[in-house]
Amino acid sequence: MTTVPERDLRLLCDALGPLRDREQVAERLLESSAKHSFDPDKELDWDAPLEDGKWFWPPELVSLYDTPLWRRMSEEQRMDLARHEAASLASLGIWFEIILMQLLVRHIYDKSATSQHVRYALTEIADECRHSMMFARMIQKGGAPAYRVPRVYHNMARVLKTVSTTPGSFASTLLGEEILDWMQRLTFPDERVQTLVRGVTRIHVVEEARHVRYAREELRRQMVTAPRWERELTRVSCGEAARVFSVCFVNPQVYENVGLDRRQAVAQVRASGHRREVMQSGARRLTEFLDDVGLLQGLGGRLWRASGLLA
């Protein structure tokens, strides 16, 4: 399939309908950014003390929830695990957003700097900078360590962000954004959770909604216009990214840091029907979209199922 000129994209459709004009989408997102952007340093009360008896993450979203090990843990130990898992997820978010910023810069490198599409990409990069600093500050406030992804995946990402196809970049973007977004939408209204954590997740949900829209629209465009080899490569790279993401989602060091046996905890998480349902529910909206745009075919679909994120 040959590349289609931008002026002819209005004539193209995919399974979701006609493609939207790239500049019009960017203009709407820029208008939303002007109305609904936040400075976390000013928006959140970082000096307020943490609240006794409140969670750092909803218990139902903690990896060991409803396992035999969870039922033997004290309430204090459960809450401590939630605190460490919140730090682990925030650390994963920082790692992922740094990758995303580099992918966005690659995407716009050859595009007109005066276009609305590029202007919005730069706006999103600014959002992600603030998010990364916000997550780092939340980790520090909670008193848990920052959890780095395993070195093999850290270095694998160096390759990904260097050689990723454009549709692969946007597919990976959605993978990192939409599952965490689903969890955060459950977190920010939950009054059992620390006020600071709820504020962090509220800001992230509001601003990430624009990022998801931008990535979805661009991925649709790329999958319609990319040559066949690039679409096939994107299916495989997206499936492999899903596998890595599922492995890195919670750093197993969190279990040791709250006094649990690491191997036993990891085994019980893998065997947990509740955890499998949580992860698949978080990914469902995304996998339905990826299926519609043709990314879950063949080997890509098999890799997604192997990740545990696709039923």
Image: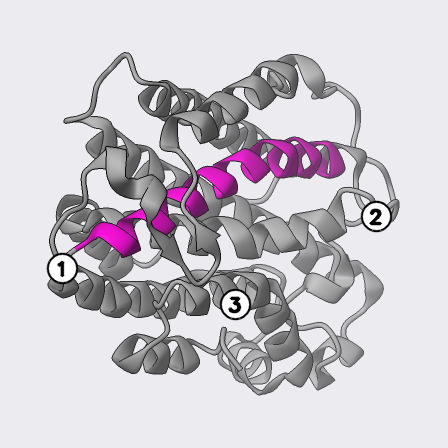
Left or right: 99, with 71 as reference point: left
Where is residue 305? Give x, y as percent: 42, 81
Residue shown at the point (81%, 68%) measured from the top left: 74
In what element is the residue under mark 1?
loop
Residue assigned mark 2: 190
- Per the model, the C-alpha gap separating discs 3 and 1 is 24 Å
Earlier residue among tags 3 and 1? 1
Q: Nearer the viewer, residue 1 or 169?
A: 1
Q: Which residues, given as a range, are shown in magenta?
A: 197-226
Q: Is residue 233 visible?
A: yes
Where is residue 247? Give x, y as percent: 41, 68
Residue assigned mark 1: 1
Q: Nearer the viewer, residue 302 or 148?
A: 302
In what element is the residue under mark 2?
loop
Residue assigned mark 3: 288
Overall secondary structure of the magenta stretch?
helix
Vertical arrangement, residue 275 with respect to residue 145, above or below? below
Q: Residues within 10 Å of mark 3 (few under 14, many from 20)?
A: few
